[in-house]
Amino acid sequence: MARNPKHDILLEPIGFGPKTSRNRFWQTSHCTGYGSERPGTQARFRAMKAEGGWGVVCTEFCSIHPESDEYPWHSARLWDQGDIINLGYMCDEVHRHQSLAGVQLWYNGMHSPCLESREVPRGPSGLPSNVFPERAVYDATADEDDIKAIINMYVLAAQRAEQAGFDIVEVTGSDSTLPMQFLERRYNRRTDRYGGSLANRSRFYIEVMAALKRAVGDALAVTTRFETDTINGEFRVQHHDEGLHFVELMHREGVCDLWAVKIGDYEEWGEDAGSSRFRQTNWMRPFVSHVKAIVGPAVPVVSNGRFTSPDDMVEALRRGQCDIIGAARPSIADPFLPAKIAAGRLEDIRECIGCNLCVSRMQQQALLSCTQNPTSGEEYRRGWHPEQFDQTANPCSVLVVGAGPAGMECAMVLGKRGYTVHLRDCAPELGGHWRDVARYPRCSEFGRVISYRQSQLAKLRNVEVQLGVSPMTADEVLQYGADKVVIATGAHWSTVGLGAEVHRPIHGADASRASVLTPEQIMRGKEVPGERVVVLDGEGYFTGIAMAELLADRGKQVTLVTNMNDVAEFSKYTMELANNKRMLHQKHIRHLTNHWAHAFEPRRLALFYLYRDSAELNELEPGRWGRRSSNALVYLDCDALVLVTSRVPNGELYAQLKSRRAEWQKNAVQAVYRIGDCHAPRQILNAIFDGHRLAREFDSPHPQYPLPFIRERQVWGHETFPKRGDARPSVEVS
Ligand code: ADP
Ligand code: SF4
């Protein structure tokens, strides 16, 4: 299908400073965990976006000096020659596809734990970090010599960036980094010319930009990422107050070639990476528009907002909100988003669902992966390309039983690789358990997991989808006539309260009773009796809190009980925890942490506190040490109990087939594999990855078990950069 001419504007080139982007698609800097230490993964991940049409591709936050060190979270780094070599590979790869490479220069002052470098960060006022309050992280107050030294750090890092081949140096003035620490009244207690008035507090930021313009501005674009509102109140940056006034001040100095605008600071960066549970596409529009109005037509503005629809993007450009569409998550979910828009292939766009599992990987100090795009992060180490699939040399017929996320993904990739696939499910629709999930409060965008795969499967003539069939038995599978079988029968919520806390059923918690319910039963319409409901949450992600909200919206008095330290504890990784708590507060949902259920009695739930036993160890009997145990219980009156305790694999079909292995040959069945939640019920991104990987490696010797991938680490005996005793360029001025 040809491109709609109204989308042409997205493909127009645009200049800023000495550089021109070939189009209006800008992959804003976003965390990955790949850093400078995994050069292959970094380069091939970013290069895929350049290949897919992103005119500008940036690194994640990139430390300019060992004083800014957030290990074990992995930033990129431009500390030395080794980093120049490693990030230089990324630049080469990005340039191969005619895109520009940007690097985000990052010095984090008081929020630098320096757990690897052991150096002391400098900052405006020598205060403890509010981001790491439990770790005793402080900065040292910078005098004017220190300030000059830090500005030198930026300049030297920018020169290293130029050596590596970067086109753009972006000063991060966002996420509570040093420029913001000087700007914000809560951090800046200075009485010299870097403190006090807004003009004084802006001085450091503007001096950094001016120094970069002087040092590298003829060759590189010097830009910034700035938050106009930290979204957390007094003494911080507020949009209509100091946020916009700062933009006016800096713009007047003429030191910034382009502005990338956002909201939210380090503590509230969930307002920048807004999840779809709380923020709709383009939620930052009002903030960004005001910046565009100040800087005028000559200085481009980049706006993010989880844009996946070209119509929304064009509207943002036409309404004067911005000149360039920025994206992190949409570019992860579909590196080929621009290319698909350019080709008019809108139905092939793999839209981000806003689940923030990508963010959660970084927040767990791990490596980025994505729910929608299982190839992200696998471009180098497994050699996967999101749009290219090796045709199988051994075509055969494959029966996939179960059309949940894992089964759909597996059938789709097998289909793209040239296998003849039958995807069968006893449910009348595709999607498995994810159909329920997409109907939970706030989770409608999650439905894109199903709709994308549904439309791709419909295009594959060698994949036959059969829905609403009777549940397949082992006999039927064996006699079906397929050469190979993939079991993707999913999982169900425990109906007896099995959970990670005690690993055994909870007395009286039996979902065959009217007063005990699982999420599946609630979504299928089982009536929730009475007024008072307890949701027992052992998952800690979105299911428990979604059940609590759904029932509160129905007028129930809800209490959320969890064994974890916090409600929906996993959501601290997806940056949703604060808004989850705000929602609970607004909807009068009570909560109790560090408790688990002992027994469900008529109209009351007996709970125990996880730490009720003694702190002291006692010799209970000769040779046997233990704690003095307590049987203390607390009681919650309730009419109904919702069990969100753990998921149990639907593993019977696979087990039966496995036990009848002797019959495979006579039925011409060569192999039976299992994927997704019936294998192990983990998070959605793992179920999809599982289905994808099996299909990619389907003709390997043992496809059930993954092939090795490239591990990037220093191999003993090879060169290091720098070496012990090497000089470090001095940044000090006197
Ligand atoms: P996953 O997340 O691993 O993809 P889901 O639970 O979402 O798992 O999906 C599993 C799907 O398998 C469901 O749609 C269910 O109806 C289907 N299913 C389970 N057992 C059978 C069976 N014996 N025959 C056909 N379909 C089945
Ligand atoms: Fe979007 Fe989720 Fe993928 Fe992140 S993990 S890019 S939020 S689909």
Image: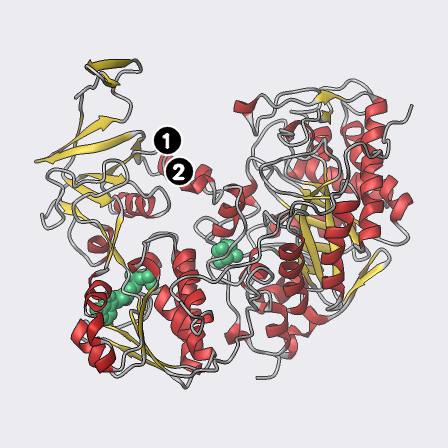
- In the rendered image, residue 77, in percent from the top left (x then y), is placed at 71, 43
Residue shown at 73%/29% (left/top)? 182
Kindly indicate the quadrant of the structure image that contains residue 477.
bottom left
Residue shown at 32%/44% (left/top)? 539
Location of residue 181 with respect to 378 vertically, above or below:
above
- SS at mark 1 in the image: loop
Task: Categorize mark 1 by other alpha carbons within 10 Å: few (<14), some (14-19), many (20+).
Answer: few
> Ligand 2 closer than 8 Å to the CB at disc 1?
no
- SS at mark 2 in the image: helix
- In the rendered image, residue 355, in percent from the top left (x then y), is placed at 46, 53
Q: Is residue 587 left or right of residue 231?
A: left
| Badge number at residue 490 | none
Task: Categorize mark 2 by other alpha carbons within 10 Å: few (<14), some (14-19), many (20+).
Answer: many
Residue contact at pointers 1 and 2, CB within 8 angstroms: yes
Amino acid type for the residue under numbered disc 1 = Asn
Kindly indicate the quadrant of the structure image that contains residue 342.
bottom right
Quadrant assignment for the C terminus: top right
Q: Looking at the image, which is closer to me, 313 or 635? A: 635
Judging by the rendered image, the residue that carries numbered circle 1 is 565
Quadrant assignment for the N terminus: bottom right
Location of residue 93 with respect to 339 vertically, above or below:
above
Q: Looking at the image, which is closer to me, 372 or 479? A: 479
Residue shown at 16%/75% (left/top)? 475
Q: Is residue 21 left or right of residue 553?
A: right
- The span from disc 1 to disc 2 (Cα, nearest Å) is 7 Å
Amino acid type for the residue under numbered disc 2 = Glu
Q: Is residue 443 left or right of residue 270?
A: left
The coloring applied to the image is secondary structure
Residue shown at 42%/37% (left/top)? 582
Judging by the rendered image, the residue that carries numbered circle 2 is 569
